[in-house]
Image (cartoon, rainbow, N blue to C red):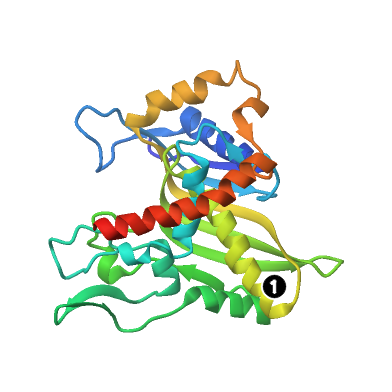
Amino acid sequence: MKNIPVIAITKKTLAEAYEAALIAVYEKGTRFKTQYDKPEDPESMDCTINITIEEPETDPMIHMAFPGGIDELKEYVLELKGYKDHWTKNMNVESDTRWEYTYHGRLQNYGVWKALVDGESKEVGPFKVDQVQSVINKLSKQPFTRQAQMITWMPNIDNDCYDPPCLQSLWYRILEDEEGVYWLNCNIRFRSNDAWGANFMNMFGFTQFNKEVIAAGVSEKTGKTVKLGRLNWQADSFHIYGKDLKVAKERLFDRLEDMSFEERTMSFNDEFIREMYDQSEEQVINKIRIYDQNH
């Protein structure tokens, strides 16, 4: 094979799209080695993918095969809102093994990084741009603009980074319907997306980020009702790591014949699930606080 497969998926809901994308890369992807493999690991399944979720907030949203819990979904959403930005490392301290970035840090504080200066941890860099507020301002002023986008890649750091950002860009545009409701459409591009281990949490997290941060920000500035239109998810490398193929077969692929789709999914807006999700916020914040105290 000389070409990496390019796969397109369009589904109504998040859970449908996630499952269809996993099946597609498993059945149609090509084999690849990765720089993170152990010698005994099988090659990964890989493709380039374009996933369109037509109604990101429509249930069923949650797929039960994703490797995580409801509290972890809440934790990731809070991370995308900046609750872990202080976990990043001082880039000029070799012994500092914390994260080199957070997505929220790159989006809201693009252009700066942390360094130890005169014994103190400080933000350094040639400029600092709040891309989140810029996008909200642009969309509020001109909903149909093609310029409302955010990026993460900082070549001065990421070209030599062991684990550079997978997320590359977010692009937004708004359609207004006959009743004056704004529909926030979004394109999100990942250079690399772990289909089994991370993709569901990524897509769920940015759906909530778009709703609670971008749409809410535009609504506040314009007085308009802003709802989520389609989410288009693009991944240059959409892959199931070889080490995860066995568990993916056991938890999903081998169950497709025996379990109905309804048994494989959950409704996020189910009263019990939503209550569990909302109540986990305090638990997650306390978890972050305890980690901070111990480190």
| Identity of the residue drawn at 49% across and 69% down | 150
- Identified by mark 1, the residue type is Ser
Residue 248 placement (x, y as % from top left): 44, 27
Determine the residue positioned at 63% across, 37% down: 16
Q: Position of residue 2 (x, y in %)?
A: 38, 38
Residue 228, image x, y percentages: 68, 59
Q: In the picture, which quadrant includes the N terminus?
A: top left
Residue 234 appears in the picture as rendered: no
- Say which quarter of the image contains residue 154: bottom left
Q: Quadrant of residue 151?
A: bottom left
* Residue 208 image position (x, y, % from top left): 58, 56
Residue 67: name its quadrant: top left
Q: Residue at x 44, y 57 (%)?
A: 285
What is the residue that sits farthest to the top in this orientation? 258
Q: Is residue 185 above or below residue 9?
A: below
Identify which residue, 39 or 109, lies in the foreground. Answer: 109
Q: Is residue 23 left or right of residue 291?
A: right
One can see residue 259 in this view: yes
Under tag 1, what secondary structure? helix
Residue 67 as seen in the image, left or right of residue 42: right
For this view, does 119 lie left or right of residue 267?
Answer: left
Residue beneath the point at 63% across and 61% down: 211
What residue is pinned by disc 1? Answer: 219
Furthest-right residue in this view? 178
